[in-house]
């Protein structure tokens, strides 16, 4: 199983398109996960027992929904959400369409990561902020988010890498992307060259994201 | 300033209900430094946390400046807390924010106009002696410095009351002393009422005007620090006092003594040694000093002597009676042979 360089050159345009599609899928779903998952994770944390917005019903309902979405295998979610995808994007094919299911999967995933990151904050710091007379909004903005900053960045890294893995399945609904390319050419057509190239691209991508995440988290942490 | 009435706090645990605070009634006057001592688990931490309602009492009321805090919730309670500063054993600063940002956080909580925040932060930093640490992160500070930032944060909104939850327990003795001096200074300059809880009796001895001793959620003794040091009523209080003023004579020495061993205590301005020499001249008894010192509690002297009195039983009895007439407190430790 040697690598045929001509084959790489031949398929290079296709690889580029796939790479671009992967970026779109991850960009959109990460954006949605941040915008919806972050507040959801914060809500999960502050409505929990003994915290300043303690609210058992809200906490249980959000926790339950999050768990349900997280229990559904992604491949099933992908198919099950085809009607929703059609409704939102007007199509069921392509990276943007695939982003809908990816987002739905990423939101609860990231919400739990946010919740865990916030749980690691020393309760005393939150209590000191309450004692000082801070508003809930101030506590979220000036205590919770800054104190969890480093773990949140690690969490985003984890989410992006998981999304790369999930996005490989997007091919099932014609989403495209690098992972899909690997499956279509490498797995179905025994095209080792393309499989190796795409896997190498994915390895490099994951490595880079991990390192960038670690670096940023460390850089921003003032402890 | 602070009225705690019939306050109880119970906790639900796996093993049933636990009484953290059990029917405590206390009053802290404006401008005084009030110390609450007790071992861990005595309920002192729960009690102080009930004062600013970090913990909501199960029953009873807490009034600060005449306002019943237990009636408040939400934003009303938040606003009341602006006027009750609090510092903690582990400081609890926001680790990702600079010293100045930690203090301005408190100012912003009170809605301070942003143009006033900078100057006020400078003022507070100067008061706690950290003007050069404005832009530094807490991780770069020593324990004492972190507590100073805690104090600056707690005082930011000019509170009437400062609660100190084991504020010096994580600090070394020298740093403890400097923090205590700072607290005393603040108390005098700003006339802030301070309530502190501690398990270290020397903290109380150093700065408190009045104190309470807690055991199993109850206040078992309360009064002026000087009076309690001079004349502790309960075994626990005695134990706490002996941790800072110890007058234990070694067993070996006591065995060799065949006279009556007495502990003599002189309060305030009474010159103890003079009275003892008067006694020795007036009665045919011999006296040996075994231990003695004059302790200063809040600048008031408290003379304590342990001595052996030799002579006939009647003479020794009369000598002791004489000391008591001269306002000494005499405790016979051993009647001798």
Image (cartoon, rainbow, N blue to C red):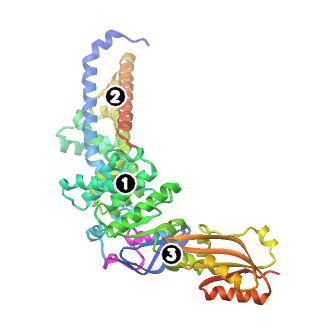
Please give the residue where the numbered disc 2 appears in the rendered image.
Answer: A179
Q: Nearer the viewer, residue A94 or A204?
A: A204
Please give the residue where the numbered disc 3 appears in the rendered image.
Answer: B225
Q: What chain letter is assigned to the residue under label 2?
A: A
Badge 3 element: helix
Residues behind callouts 3 and 1 on a single chain: yes
Q: Position of residue B316 (x, y in %)?
A: 74, 86
Q: Are marks 2 and 1 in contact (CB under 8 Å)?
A: no
Q: Quadrant of the N terminus of chain A?
A: top left
Considering only order in the chain, which callout, 1 or 3, is on the residue closer to the N terminus?
1
Q: Which residues are magenta?
A: B47-70
Q: Residues within 10 Å of mark 1 (few under 14, many from 20)?
A: many
Q: Quadrant of the C terminus of chain A?
A: top left
Q: Are marks 3 and 2 in contact (CB under 8 Å)?
A: no
Q: What chain letter is assigned to the residue under label 1?
A: B
Q: Residues within 10 Å of mark 2 (few under 14, many from 20)?
A: many
Badge 1 element: helix
Q: Residues within 10 Å of mark 3 (few under 14, many from 20)?
A: many
Please give the residue where the numbered disc 1 appears in the rendered image.
Answer: B149
Q: Nearer the viewer, residue A60 or B108?
A: B108
Query: Residue B225 vs residue B314: left or right?
Result: left
Within the magenta stretch, is there residue B53?
Answer: yes
């Amino acid at each position: 199983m040697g690598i045929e360089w001509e084959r790489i050159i031949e398929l290079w345009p296709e690889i580029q398109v796939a790479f671009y599609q992967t970026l779109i899928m991850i960009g959109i779903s990460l954006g949605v996960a941040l915008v919806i998952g972050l507040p959801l994770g914060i809500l999960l944390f502050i409505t929990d027992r003994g915290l300043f917005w303690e609210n058992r019903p809200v906490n249980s309902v959000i926790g339950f929904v999050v768990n349900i979405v997280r229990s559904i295998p992604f491949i099933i979610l992908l198919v099950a959400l085809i009607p929703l995808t059609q409704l939102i994007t007007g199509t069921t094919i392509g990276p943007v369409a695939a982003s809908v299911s990816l987002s739905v999967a990423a939101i609860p995933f990231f919400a739990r990561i946010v919740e865990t990151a916030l749980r690691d904050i020393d309760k005393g710091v939150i209590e000191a902020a309450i004692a000082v007379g801070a508003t809930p909004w101030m506590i979220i903005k000036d205590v919770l988010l800054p104190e969890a900053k480093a773990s949140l960045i690690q969490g985003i890294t984890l989410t992006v890498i998981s999304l790369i893995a999930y996005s490989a399945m997007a091919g099932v609904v014609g989403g495209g992307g690098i992972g899909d390319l690997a499956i279509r050419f490498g797995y179905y057509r025994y095209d080792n060259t393309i499989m190796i190239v795409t896997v190498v691209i994915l390895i490099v991508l994951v490595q880079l994201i991990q390192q960038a995440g670690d670096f940023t988290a460390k850089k921003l942490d003032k402890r | 300033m602070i009225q705690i009435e019939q306050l109880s706090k119970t906790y639900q645990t796996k093993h049933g209900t636990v009484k953290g605070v059990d029917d405590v009634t206390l009053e802290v006057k404006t401008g005084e430094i009030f110390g609450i001592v007790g071992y861990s688990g005595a309920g002192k931490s729960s009690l102080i946390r009930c004062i600013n309602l970090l913990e909501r009492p199960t029953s009873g009321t807490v009034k600060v400046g005449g306002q019943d805090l237990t009636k408040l919730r939400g934003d009303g309670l938040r606003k009341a807390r602006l006027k009750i500063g609090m510092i903690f054993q582990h400081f609890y600063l926001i680790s990702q924010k600079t010293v100045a940002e930690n203090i301005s956080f408190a100012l912003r909580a009170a809605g301070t106009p942003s143009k006033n925040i900078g100057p006020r932060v400078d003022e507070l930093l100067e008061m706690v002696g950290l003007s050069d640490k404005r832009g530094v992160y807490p991780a770069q500070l020593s324990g004492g410095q972190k507590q100073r930032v805690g104090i600056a944060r707690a005082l930011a909104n000019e509170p009437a009351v400062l609660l100190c939850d084991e504020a010096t327990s994580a600090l070394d003795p020298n740093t403890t002393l400097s923090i205590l001096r700072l607290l005393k200074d603040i108390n005098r300059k700003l006339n802030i009422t301070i309530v502190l809880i501690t398990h270290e009796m020397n903290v109380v001895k150093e700065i408190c005007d009045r104190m309470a001793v807690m055991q199993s959620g109850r206040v078992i003794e309360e009064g002026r620090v000087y009076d309690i040091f001079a004349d502790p009523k309960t075994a626990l209080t005695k134990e706490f006092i002996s941790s800072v003023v110890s007058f234990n004579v070694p067993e070996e020495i006591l065995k060799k003594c065949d006279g009556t061993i007495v502990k003599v205590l002189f309060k305030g301005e009474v010159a103890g040694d003079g009275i003892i020499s008067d006694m020795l001249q007036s009665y045919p008894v011999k006296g040996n000093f075994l231990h003695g010192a004059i302790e200063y509690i809040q600048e008031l002297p408290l003379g304590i002597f342990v001595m052996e009195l030799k002579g006939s039983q009647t003479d020794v009895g009369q000598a002791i009676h004489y000391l008591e007439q001269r306002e000494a407190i005499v405790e016979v430790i051993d009647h001798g042979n």
